[in-house]
């Protein structure tokens, strides 16, 4: 499976190239941050931002999958649809 350079991974690589190398290799290297309460709270904050965005754009579409390729495909299909809000 390809590992894409997302904004988060890019920032991680700027901080420490070694961290970038070891990310998303849970089957080989355990990630102690998975049980970190601070990181869990930060993730919850990310969900709150998502819910706030939904309140600003009611009637939008929520992509639920965590698979990167599948989410891109679903988003592209929605953009090709007739109900796309093209406001800038």
Image: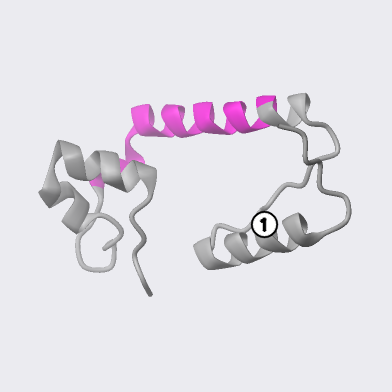
Horizontal and vertical percent position of residue 62: 72, 47
Q: Nearer the viewer, residue 54 or 33?
A: 54
Image height of 2 relative to 75, above or below: below
Quadrant including the C terminus = top right
Q: Which residue is rendered at x = 77% and y = 34% of the image? A: 87
Q: Would you identify the image quadrant in which residue 56 lies? A: top right
Q: Position of residue 78 (x, y in %)?
A: 76, 57
Badge 1 marks a residue whose secondary structure is helix
Within-10-Å neighbours for mark 1: few <14, some 14–19, many 20+ = some
**Which residue bears the numbered disc 1?**
75
Type of secondary structure dominating the magenta stretch: helix
Q: Is residue 60 above or below residue 70?
A: above
Within the magenta stretch, is there residue 61?
Answer: no
Nearer-the-camera pick, 82 or 57 = 82
Which residue is pictured at 78% across the width and 31% down the height?
A: 57
Residue sitting at the far bottom? 1
In the rendered image, the vertical position of residue 23 relative to residue 52, given as above or below: below
- 7 horizontally vs 52: left or right: left
Q: Is residue 85 visible?
A: yes
Viewer-nearest residue: 63 or 5: 5
Place residue 1 in its image quadrant.
Answer: bottom left
Residue interval drawn in magenta? 32-52
């Amino acid at each position: 499976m390809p590992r894409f350079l997302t904004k988060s991974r890019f920032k991680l690589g700027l901080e420490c190239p070694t961290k970038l190398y070891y990310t998303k290799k849970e089957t080989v290297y355990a990630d102690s941050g998975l049980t970190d309460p601070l990181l869990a709270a930060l993730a919850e904050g990310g969900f709150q931002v998502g819910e706030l965005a939904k309140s600003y754009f009611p009637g939008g579409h929520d992509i639920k999958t965590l698979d990167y390729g599948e989410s891109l495909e679903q988003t592209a299909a929605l953009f090709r649809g007739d109900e796309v809000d093209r406001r800038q």
